Amino acid sequence: MTKFKLLKQIFSIGILFLILGIHKIHAQGCVAIRGFSSCNGYMEDGGFLMKGDFSVGTNFRYFQSFRHFRGTHEETNRVANGTQVINDSYFVDIAFNYAVTDRLYATVLLPFASHVRSSMYEHGGNPPNGLGERHITRSSGLSDMRLGVGYWLFEHSTKPYNFAIGTGIKLPTGDYNYMDTFYNQGPNRDQDVLRVVDQSIQLGDGGIGFNVDFQGYYMLSNSFTLTTTLYYLFNPEETNGVLTRGGSSEFSVPDQFAAQLGTFYSPKIKGLSFYLGGRIEGVPSSDLIGSSDGYRRPGYAISVDPGINYNTNNLSLSLNVPVALERNRTQSFSDKKRTSETGVFTQGDAAFADYLINFNLTYRFRNNKNKDVDFNMVH
């Protein structure tokens, strides 16, 4: 292990989570989005973080991607023939939130991930042209750390709505050159070789990025509240210097985007609320800043997002299970370039999940001066 990797592992001992009622945004599958909002100064029924308040939370997510799409067309033959790639991905995030003032807050977020990837084509080839042996590769450890700040535009409790803007920085603390054993390699397909794992299970993207985000709510009544979150991560670097397993190009350092719109319903049961919304998340073919060359799998997923939440004055729990409605593996920058050069339409595929399990738990430590404040000022 290099000194740099050792420092990253030491630096990674920490904590995280985000989303205090406004939900985390993560993509599902080989289109690898690792971003989320830095805005999180609000707990749905627990109210806002007030000056000096501090929260610690954890978030657990799981999905299995296995359905292959090229554009919006599902290649059902992959599952039928047993040649599909299967990614089982687990994420545990830990986060600190601190209210600098009643409206300004800061976040430190440390994400950890564990992936198990099962395939045939990486281990000798899919039948009938390959050996048809299914093997797995793995990766686990710290992902890319986030630091962020956010600011609420209005004083709390003065209006039935409020909006926050945020910004943050993404640091390349996750290993973006993770390697594992691949089987049936070499000209005679009789070698076991240590090589870089697929981009979808790399722990980081290797670039320093920055994000902008927006979140807000509007109270329609005592029972219904609209919420929204918009997020964009800028990754100005072109590639991270790591060659793909085949050595044909370097991994791209892509931008990421996400948006969420939904409604909370609060029945007359203290602390309980239900959520229903829609979300889109993905990776664009071209970055807004810098070059877009290198290897990436762009695309997006649109999901319906049901959830349930329970909150006390200090504790917030939520469970969401977004279900995919549309999955689209779009043309990459390289696909478009090859199409232009050869005149033959080129578009790669990617595996997506059917659903995602997302569980959040956050605990707030109140400033002693705020102990007598009514934190349920929104509901």
Image (spheres, helix red, strand yellow):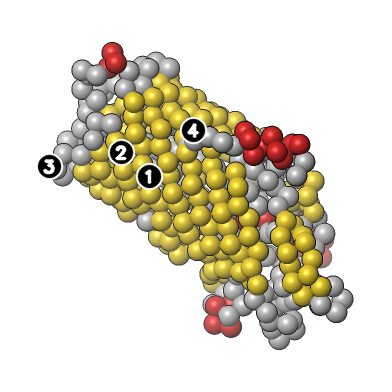
Is the residue marked by circle 4 packed among few (<14), some (14-19), or many (20+) residues within 10 Å?
many
Q: Residue furthest right?
A: 187
Residue 360 - label: 1
- Residue type at tag 3: Lys
- How far apart are labels 1 and 4 at the CA level? 16 Å
Residue 38 - label: 4
Q: For mark 2, give the secondary structure.
A: strand
- Residue type at tag 4: Ser
Q: Residue at x 64, y 68 (%)?
A: 136
- How far apart are labels 2 and 1 at the CA level? 8 Å
Name the residue tied to disc 3: 268
Is the residue marked by circle 1 packed among few (<14), some (14-19), or many (20+) residues within 10 Å?
many
- Residue type at tag 2: Ser
- How far apart are labels 4 and 2 at the CA level? 18 Å
Quick check: 348 left or right of 42?
right
Question: N-terminal of the two: label 1 or label 4?
Answer: 4
Question: N-terminal of the two: label 2 or label 1?
Answer: 2
Q: For mark 4, give the secondary structure.
A: loop
Q: Position of residue 78 (x, y in %)?
A: 59, 77
Q: For mark 1, give the secondary structure.
A: strand
Residue 316 - label: 2
Q: Position of residue 65 (x, y in %)?
A: 53, 64
- Residue type at tag 1: Asn
- Tag 2–tag 1 contact (CB < 8 Å): yes
Q: Residue furthest left?
A: 268
- Tag 3–tag 4 contact (CB < 8 Å): no
Question: N-terminal of the two: label 4 or label 2?
Answer: 4
Nearest-to-viewer mark from 1 and 4? 1
- Tag 1–tag 4 contact (CB < 8 Å): no
Q: For mark 3, give the secondary structure.
A: loop
